[in-house]
Amino acid sequence: MHETMQSRHSQLFRHTASAKHCGQRGRFRQSARAFFWLLMICLFFVPVCESAAQDTPQDDREAILTGMRDRLRETGILRDAIPALTTPDYVTVRDASLSMDPREAVFIAFFFPDGIPRIYPQRILVWHEVINEVLDQSTAVITYSPLTGSVAAYSGVSGRYNLGFGVTGLLLDNNSVLYDFFSNSKWAQLPGLCFDGAFKGRALKRLPIFWTTWERAQATYPEAKVLSASTGFKRDYGRDPYGDYMLPGTYYDSGPVIYPIHNIDKRMDPKRPVLGIEQDGLFAAVDKVAVRKAGVVNFTLGVTALVAVYDPILDTVRLYKRSFDDRTLNFEWAVDRMVDKETRTEWSRDGVGGVGYFRGKRLEPVVGVDCMWFAWANFYPGTRIVPGPTF
């Protein structure tokens, strides 16, 4: 089975030099060029902030980045054979529902200037892995790596530059490797980190994106825009080559990891879904299954008090800081909502205080990365598990 999955992955997006493929590559290059020049216009007119310096000591950081570069794996998939989308089209929820299964996985983002959520079907992203978005004065990128089950959204801003991204076809410990259109630097998808090229050592800022199902997303956000399957590329969007999140026994929940990984951590099942987070230079993997059962988990990472809460509307987990106004709250689950023990204020899944003393107050959200346990533990060895014996 292991060799079969490797073969399937290496053959999946390999294209022959047919006229159809050349035409698709040409269209991709044209759209990528257009996107690049749009970014340059944004860059010329809009100054952006310099990214924060990394906290890791210089020698250690260099060793980590060199190690990442040395572990790159050729897969037989050519650069841009997995074509990133640079000019995505959207349809209404009503139109999308004609071809969507209620149980299928989707990703939903809320950071767009028009205030309208965007819904990204997993069965489309599995064929593209990257969607470049232009916001009012900057860029954002939606990324998905099938082999690590990791979905992450990032600001495209790095230093003075608004970046767009494509897919190299390379893998780093099973994780997709991206490149930016501006400098051709290589970036690891899950950590959002550049490990080779002009932007080496820089990390992208994570943006919130939530993993849910189509049934829940369309019912909760009927006004949302849904990524259209009319991408300009000929792909079988009705089939996921790695299996199906809706059915047991596929790559996504069982079976071996396809390629060898650098760090193996056996504390949890390799495919266990977690939310990876970083705070105060420390890392943790929030066990989504455990939080779903508990409702609420209070924990501290570094000097920051945090809470993981189950969102029953989207069937996902959200993270918040639980300190404000020099006061730290402790939460518990009360039937179907979060309540702080100190004042018994009821809090919504969006972290907003309702009935009670803290009415109208808002908890600061913390962005996590949905991924498989083996992937997060590989990039962040020794990561803490939440909840755990000492949480």
Image (cartoon, helix red, strand yellow):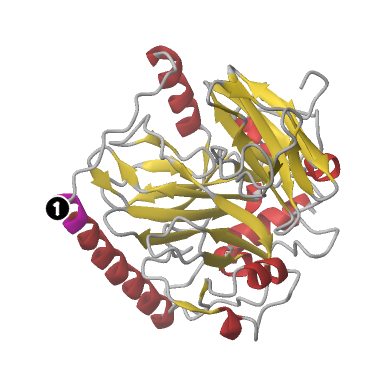
Q: Which residues are magenta?
A: 41-45
For image coordinates 74% across by 46% down, the residue present is: 310
Under circle 1, the secondary element is helix
Residue 386: name its quadrant. Answer: top right
- The picture places residue 13, in percent across and down from the top left corner, at 54, 65
x then y, percent, for residue 290: 82, 39
In the image, 238 versus 54, the foreground residue is 54
Vertical position of residue 66 compared to residue 87: above or below: above
Q: Which quadrant is the N terminus positioned in?
A: bottom right
Front one among 295 and 102: 295
Compared across the picture, whether 187 is left or right of 223 comes to: left
Q: Which residue is disc 1 drawn over?
A: 45
Q: State yes or no: residue 84 in magenta.
A: no
Per the picture, the main secondary structure of the magenta-coloured stretch is: helix
Residue 271 in view of the camera: no
Instruction: Please name whichever residue, 366 or 125, is drawn nearer the observer in this view of the structure.
Output: 366
